[in-house]
Amino acid sequence: MEALDIFATASLWSAVLRIATPLIFGTLGALICERAGVLNLGIEGIMTLGAMVAWMTVYQGGNLWMGLLVAALCGGLFGLLHALLTVPLGLSQHVTGLGITLFASSLTYYVYRLSLPVTSSPPTIEPFQPLAIPGLSDIPFFGEAFFTQTAPTYLALFAVLLTAYLLARTPLGLAIRMTGENPHAVEAQGLNPVRIRIGAIVAGSALMALGGAFLTTATFNSFFPTMVQGRGWVCIALVVFASWRPGKALLGALLFALFDAYQLRLQHVIESAIPYQLFLMVPYVLSIVALVVMSRRAKVPQALMAPYRKGER
Amino acid sequence: MRLERRTQSSLALLLAAPVIAIVIALALSGGLIALAGVNPLDAYAAMVKGAFGSRLSISETLTRTTPLILTGLAAAVAFRARLWNIGGEGQLYAGALVAAWLGHNMAAGLPTPLAIILIMLAGMLAGALLLLGPVLLRLRLGVDEVVTTLILNFIVLLFVSMMIEGPLKDPLAFGWPQSVPVDSDVMLPKLLSRSRLHIGLIIAILAAFVIWIVQSRTVFGMETKAAGLNTRAASFAGIKLGRTLLGVACISGGMAGLAGAIEVTGLKGYVTLDLSPGYGYSGIVVAMLAALHPVGVVITALFVAIVFVGADAMSRALGVPSFIADVIVSISLLTMLVSLLFTTYRVRR
Amino acid sequence: MNRETVLELAHISKHFGKLIANDDISLTLGKGELLALLGENGAGKTTLMNVLFGHYTADGGQVSAFGEILPPGKPRAAIEAGIGMVHQHFTLAGNLTVLDNVMIGTERLGLLRSGRKQAAAKLRGLSERFGLQVEPYAFVADLSVGEKQRVEILKALYRDARILILDEPTAVLTQIEAEQLFQTLRGMTDTGLSVIFISHKLAEVMAASDRVVILRGGRTVAEKRTSDTNRAELAELMVGRRVVRPVRTDQAPGRNILSAGKVDIVEDGRKLLDGIDFTVRAGEILGIIGVSGNGQAALGQLTCGLRGADTGTLVYDGNQANGFSPRMLVTSGTGRIPEDRNTEGAIAEMAIWENAVLERIHEKRFSAYGFVNRARCRDYATELIDRFDIRGAAPDTRTGLLSGGNMQKMILGRNLAASPKLIIANQPTRGLDEGAIAAVHAELLAARKDGAAILLISEDLDEVLALSDTIQAIFKGRLSAPLSAEDADSRTVGLMMAGIWETSHAA
């Protein structure tokens, strides 16, 4: 098989959607937070947490959807912590976010280790199975590539539509956008920007946790430390790449996943002297490239990272 | 209820902040220890004993303190200038790799002290260079350095993995991915016989004092402080923001790189992928707990080292997962942020 | 005639730390009335209106609108009671459309779909009815200052405001735009709306209001029917004591110190400065007058060394270049008073001594071999504090604790101490009270007497007329031809500020 033939395999495209799913959830989550004016660097830890609690819920006998729900709730809870520290208290969003990541991931490992004794191979669960969409999945090639995914992948795509509609077409979306642009304008019109920011961070963090949960309930079937592998940071870069727009975020996540899926297959095709680490670097290098390319073009929310304190002059 | 700025924040308040933060963090973590079925007080007693109970444990704690001082300085220097260098981990590995490579190839010719100094400088240079990229991207294109430095950590780790499985692989390591060893001549002298403690600790403490003097007594220190507090006023006063930021980046990246070089030449003798248990990230906590004061960093690094060394011992004795150390450290970062806020603000009804 | 009372403020008090901003203030507003709230900077006008609107919670007193007491600290309640507020610093989002900015907060947040079409129609209707033309789908960032103000007023009208509060509405308008605004406001009061506008400009208060309430030092000092009072009386009530602004004396100018020739500054394809020419001579004050946002910021940056000219040249005391660095300017004897003392002039978190020496820290007396000589820096700060009467300050005081006037004295002091040959004074009295203004004017005139060339960039017509030997107006990045002080009166200069010189030029 030649390097270009890979693009003609349905399994590549099917993998693209699978790899993209956690990125879509994470990027949407980060995007909602940032649209309201708050950078959430807790993402890496929240994804780790989501991965573990979803897995643990299922391992303890809950069903898969219950796992996702518990992950979202826990993610929302850590989002609330980030929100309380950065919004009413106005602490540095950078440092607080990192603190949340360190806290969420160390707590995750601690609880995981506490619940399960050390074993040589991590215990497994029965993950989400691919769901063939009747009719569409029968289309040759496309059916296998795009319409035979696990349920959470469809959920992620639906979340993109929902977020896009919410931001552009509803009063709540306008309030979120306005809070990210100028919280004083929101307050002057009788809404409470503090509550809007807190709400957006909680919701965004819940989505991030779903991204993590996808890893243990669909991509893999077990939890192991460091499994999120910087995906959260990639999502933060993707938000910039997407110019803070949900549609472009989907595009960015898919593009990313395409590179990632392709390099995995390319490694098998060209058995050359190229070290595998170079392939693994690709997504990270790409996210930096994405940041550089978009750095000058995007309309950044004007109040991003600016704390808002009522009545302060 | 709302926050109101204090007109004066007293020194006592500033000194109390980390103490209060740590006490609260220990109390909260105590709840988690209790979940493991262990009395938190017993656990903390075991930790203190594990960190200070014997000559060996004291030397271990101090050995751990060394890289934490340096990565703490890396974060403290950068954050003071509002340069969000989160890439300490990657910079540490860059310094370590360069030190291993030089240390392996430099046995011949040079007198030992000179060789050691050269290796230290090379490690610093490697760390500094790694940070210059993100800083230049921020200065030229406005790319947020948080994300770039974070992501570089992953790239550097993959690069190190590539090197120690490739060109720098130790052929005598039975296939384990580890780098070629540093020549024993250029290993740092021990500070205490029959222990792992080496003079790196002295170097780190010296570095803290030098940085303190630079920050508080020099024109460069004054200009970076101004640039960190208010970029518009600083450039109005004629301070070249780009240049001060690059200077800060050199010191910050240099300290992290030095941490790596010292770990390799002082302790391990070669590079592996578990050279650092997250010293780069813990450095951020160390710096924040010290409220970014370079001399304070020495003390807070000691605290974090106590937690890590103590937790290992406590974990062996009482069966509480040693991840509790990371939990304590990360909670104390968050509580410190809050208590720092209350040194400059007060709550008003 | 007795109007029906629509709004009543009773015994409002509000303090910030030690500062008492409002002290037992009461006032009423009648239906269809145009009330002016007059007071100099720091008198407590804005604080009072922010309490009324619920941005601040008062320490004491209450607000009632149409007979109902408003809950404190709730802008939403104020809006629902029919109060609309136009802030001095617009509360608009530039990246969003006019419609977005108007609609925010008008619909229930739980609503699944925003009624944008109907809203746009309602907005169009309102803008026609009140003569406030704006395009609903335009991005706010692309609007002029005057249009932005219209959006702010429309925001209030869209929510059926019956009481409109405007904070310093003419600060950013030309004289003509200001007159139009008051016409619009008068049209509104004729239909039964009530309006309060905050101002410190006597002329517009006399011309436009029905009644005037004068605040001073956080208290109500008087309340007058506009028809029963006059400018002189209002001035005295507003300031409370007779502050005599110093007077310029005739003096022959010396050699050319700074001149600009055909200077352009371009940003994103827009000319911020467009072929400007000017010359300042020793012992002369050149006043650049203009409404905010016409290129003053770029002119300030150019002359303070923060950016160079894209085309054209500057000549400073014989040296020709397209720009100078701040360090070069400072060492060659230039005093630079920045437009915004809080964000550019001083670093609030640093000590006074640090701010005093920051721009000249490289001088031998303050540092050697890269090390700061702290003792000398502190001595210098002490000298400035004594000589320029900076109150409430010691060398180690945090600069942010100084009042506006004292901070400006510190900035003036560090610039004037070295007897500069050139002074760039960009809005030197903005936000200061009458006493502080007089002090700043006195210092500038003293420097002029000592032979300094002074470039005064200001939006305050009275200030420019009082201080300048020569006046040039700035409008859309262009400078008018110089007008000597003898030929200048407020009418002529007012027209120049609206760019009228250009048409007369062409004719």
Image (cartoon, coloured by chain):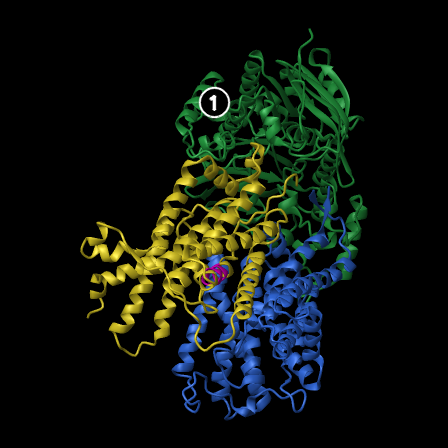
Above or below, comparing residue C81 to residue A74 in the picture: above
**What's drawn in magenta, residue-wise?**
A47-55
Q: Is residue A51 magenta?
A: yes
> Which x, y percent locates residue C483?
57, 28
Q: Quadrant of the N terminus of chain C?
A: top right
- Which lettered chain is shown in yellow? A
From the viewer's perspective, tell me whether residue A143 is left or right of residue A234.
left
> Which x, y percent locates residue B20?
72, 61
Q: In which quarter of the image is the C terminus of chain C?
A: top left
The residue tagged with tag 1: helix, strand or loop? helix
Front-most of residues C385 and B335: B335
Rendered shade, chain B: blue
Chain letter of the residue beneath label 1 in the structure image: C
Residue shown at 68% from the left, 88% from the top: B192
Instruction: Tell me the quarter of the picture where residue C337 sits.
Output: top right
From the viewer's perspective, tell me whether residue C5 is left or right of residue B83.
right
> Which x, y percent locates residue A133?
26, 51
Q: Is residue B72 magenta?
A: no
Return the residue at label 1.
C504
Residue C130 visible in the snapshot: yes
> Which x, y percent locates residue B178?
45, 84
- Which lettered chain is shown in green? C
Amino acid residing under circle 1 = Ser
Residue shown at 66% from the left, 60% from the top: B336
Front-most of residues B212 and C288: B212
